[in-house]
Amino acid sequence: MRDELISLLHEAFETGIITSTMQSQIDAVKKSLKLSEAEYQQIEDEIRIDTYIRKVKERERKGVTFMGDLRKQYKITEDDKLIIQEKFNAEPKKPAPNSPEIPKQFVPPVKKAEAPKPPEPPKQSGVMNRSDKLKQHVPGLPKEEEPLPAPAKKAEAPKRPVPVEKPSPVYDDPTGPLILVADDNETQLFLTRKTLEENNYQCVTADSPEIAVRIIAEKQPALVLCDINFGIGRPTGMDVFTNTRAKKFTMPFILVSAFIQKEFMDHAKRIGVTEYITKPTEPEELIAVVKKYLH
């Protein structure tokens, strides 16, 4: 049973999402094992940190150095950072490729210091090179070696500046339908909002599922664009959708996610999500989907 719990947690942290079915299985196994909350948390933390370390190594092998989104996704705390550092330090260091290993008992002999050799006197040559001549040169450089002055250019009449027409702003005051964008990635929120406002849509954003649910209830937007994954242990975009429908709100609800697995798409379709599109999404594609349901 313990192995089953570990397997379920590995799957959850690997995909970055816990479905309601998976959570029910975890709760059932936890209950069968009679684990206290502290014991369960210890197991979960160990798998969470091990998965984070593996993801970091995968990125490093690809030459990626930014890990901010991973730290946020796996909720890495200051205490976690100490544990992670200890795990890295405990790993055996691999020898550099193509470098022979030196036996431990081998001690390289110490070479005796050799007396420094006196510097050799410069060789005299009958021909003096140009740099020597310049060192010995006195004022009065012959005219043939002086650089010729550049010919004076004729002053050109100043050109009149060509007036440049500034493009008029496209989205000073959007007046189109209100759209909610829910995502925990600040960059994604900014880019999506910019795209929508450039196309004259009003936009409101939420960086958590809880805020998204509140905005839907208060503002009742014409359409919702929602991410699936808001972090391990947090409600998902699918939870936001079911909450929305439970409160009888019927606006189009579009899931925008980096998960391309068919199981997520099929589940979204089964529960009645309006449409499922994957990231990264081109601005033209996003606007085409929005217009499909608002025009």
Image: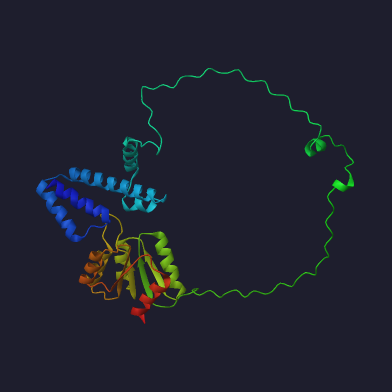
Image x and y of residue 73, in percent: 32, 53
For residue 279, what is the image quadrant?
bottom left
Q: Nearer the viewer, residue 114 or 206?
A: 114
Image location of residue 294, percent across then percent down: 35, 79
Judged from this view, the residue extending furthest toward the bottom is 295
Which one is nearer the viewer's eye here, 94 or 286? Answer: 94
At x 39%, y 48%, the residue is 60
What residue is at 85 percent from the left and 46 percent from the top?
145
Foreground of the two, 276 or 55: 55
Q: How many numbered discs?
A: 0
- Residue 205: x and y in percent read 38, 66
Work out which quarter of the rendered image holds the C terminus and state it: bottom left
Residue 20's image quarter? Answer: bottom left
Q: Residue furthest front?
A: 126
Residue beneath the point at 40% across and 60% down: 186
Query: Is 164 situated above or below 139?
Result: below
Say left or right for 236 vs 173.
left
Q: Is residue 67 above or below residue 206?
A: above
Q: Quadrant of residue 272?
A: bottom left
Horizontally, residue 137 falls left or right of residue 114, namely right
In this picture, residue 55 sits left or right of residue 268: right
Q: What percent of the width, then of the height, locates residue 68?
A: 39, 51
